[in-house]
Image (cartoon, rainbow, N blue to C red):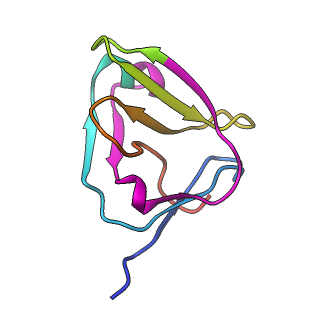
């Protein structure tokens, strides 16, 4: 049986992606870094292995900074509409975050 594929992307559709594996973790993060990046009290985080994540086209812009943990965070976003998207955290080897639903 082939895995179910989930599509996601930014608001304007310039950065579509597919996830073809089950998430290793789905959670709501309340840390200050996630609050700042999302603009709300929590961010929904979906962790998937890189092998199950595919950027279909487009190129993200990124911003790297030192988080409250003292470790680097690399956040990617759409340069056209500003939608937050994929980010990498020092604890995990794969992409994190992302909006689900059709781009």
Q: Nearer the viewer, residue 37 or 95?
A: 95
Of the 4 image quadrants, the one containing the N terminus is: bottom left
- Counting every numbered tag in the picture gives 0
Residue 93 picture location, percent across and down: 34, 42
Q: Is residue 45 magenta?
A: yes
Q: Nearer the viewer, residue 57 or 82?
A: 57
Q: Note whether residue 27 is visible.
A: yes
Observer able to see residue 39: no
* Residue 74 falls left or right of residue 31: right
Residue 90 in the image: x percent, y percent?
32, 29
Residue drawn at point x = 41 percent, y = 59 percent? 51
In which quadrant is the C terminus drawn?
A: bottom right
On the rendered structure, is 96 left or right of 82? Answer: left
Q: Is residue 49 left or right of residue 102?
A: left
Q: Quadrant of residue 73?
A: top left
> Outermost residue, bottom direction?
1
Whether 45 is drawn above or below 37: the answer is below
Query: What residue sits 42% from the left and 68% below the top?
Result: 20
For the point 59% across and 29% down, which residue is it?
62
> What's the residue at 65%, 39% (across, down)?
60
Is 67 within the magenta? no
Q: Position of residue 100 (x, y in %)?
A: 47, 55
The one nearer the camera, 19 or 28, is 19
Magenta part of the chain: 35-64
The residue positioned farthest toward the right in the image shown: 80
Q: Relative to residue 16, is residue 30 depicted above or below?
A: above
Horizontal and vertical percent position of residue 86: 49, 41
The answer to which quarter of the image holds residue 89 is top left
């Amino acid at each position: 049986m082939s895995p179910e594929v989930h599509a996601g992307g930014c608001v304007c559709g310039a950065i579509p992606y597919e996830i073809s594996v089950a998430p290793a973790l789905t959670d709501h993060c309340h840390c200050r870094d996630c609050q700042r990046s999302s603009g709300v009290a929590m961010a929904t985080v979906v962790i998937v292995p890189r092998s199950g994540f595919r950027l279909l086209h487009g190129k993200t812009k990124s911003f790297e900074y030192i988080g409250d943990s003292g470790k680097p965070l690399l956040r990617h976003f759409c340069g056209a509409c500003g939608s937050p998207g994929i980010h990498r955290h020092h604890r995990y080897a794969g992409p994190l975050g992302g909006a689900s639903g059709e781009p």
